[in-house]
Image (spheres, grey):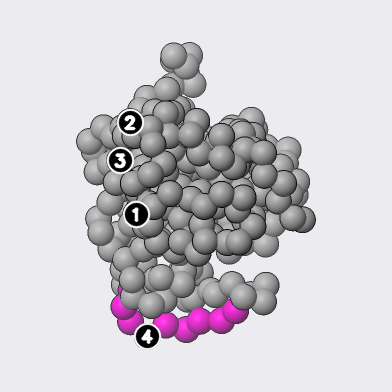
Amino acid sequence: MPAPDTQTQHDEDRALLNNAVSEAGVIALSYYQKKLKTWMKDGDSIVTEADIAVNEHLHRKLAQARPHYGWLSEETEDDAHRLQRTRVWVVDPIDGTRAFAKGKPHFTISVALVEAGRPVLAALFNPATDEFFEAEIGQGALLSGEPIKVGHRRKIEGARMAAHGPMFKHPAWREPWPEMEIIERNSVAYRIALVACDAADAALALNTKNDWDLAAADLILHEAGGRFTSHDGKVPIYNQEIPRHRSLLAAGPELYEALFARVGALKLPG
């Protein structure tokens, strides 16, 4: 258990975080399924006016309330001063922007508080479905106020896999994957959260992800009893100089082992 003063700080930060993310959901919904101003960044990444509005709200509510914490957000120019901060807000204002822009309910607002490289608080909200995931280190994970746990599936065959389906048909696989139920969600964080609440059995991605894609969902899955690593078994460390991660593997403990046996030795290009 954290020391009393640390727990008090966590309680205050959790209340601040949950309130800010709940309000951000209202803002996101005010733009949802309406004509949006959009533009592209980094060549193929879409941004909407909703991303910016939510980001500005979260920065105003979180960064200004905790000026001694760092800030890392997909929609804010990176500031290296975060590397000197013990605690850092890691933010994706809208994870799954492409789905959001198309009016599909497969997006989330994702915020974690990272301390010494690992998430200690998390809130992940899909306002279109009214699913609010939250977690505090050592305190379990909740979905809309109710405790959640990962499933106990062991076999890959028949598993509900939250991933990009064509990946499993790639000719580079030495042996074909067994039949699975593929759950396509544009939001990476949402895919992992679905594993945490046993709406999916596993999530796998073999392309690069960023801190803001993973940090909140990482803690929620961990606190729900799941395992979360890169495909080769490395536990993510957040708020590094380059806040990127080569891959992800998320599942309940038994299925994680079966999936790791299949993908753990892969050597990915780049």
Q: Amino acid at mark 2?
A: His
Position of residue 145 measured from the top left corner of the image (x, y, whole percent) = 24, 38
Please name which of the two marks, 1 or 3, marks the residue nearer to the observer: 1
Please name which of the two marks, 2 or 4, marks the residue nearer to the observer: 2
Residue that carries the numbered disc 4 in the rendered image? 35
Residue 159, compared with residue 96, is above or below; it is above
Residue that carries the numbered disc 2 in the rendered image? 152
Q: Amino acid at mark 1?
A: Glu
- Badge 4 element: loop
Q: Which comes before the other along the chain, label 2 or label 4?
A: 4
Residue that carries the numbered disc 3 in the rendered image? 198
Q: Which comes before the other along the chain, label 4 or label 1?
A: 4
For the residues labelled 1 and 3, the Cα–Cα distance comes to 14 Å
Tell me if label 3 and label 2 are in contact, CB under 8 Å: no
The circle on residue 181 is 1
Q: Is residue 134 visible?
A: no
Question: What residue is shown at x 28% (from left), y 51% (from top)?
Answer: 131
Q: Is residue 25 left or right of residue 171?
A: left
Q: In which quadrant is the N terminus drawn?
A: top left
Question: What residue is shown at x 43% (from left), y 28% (from top)?
Answer: 253
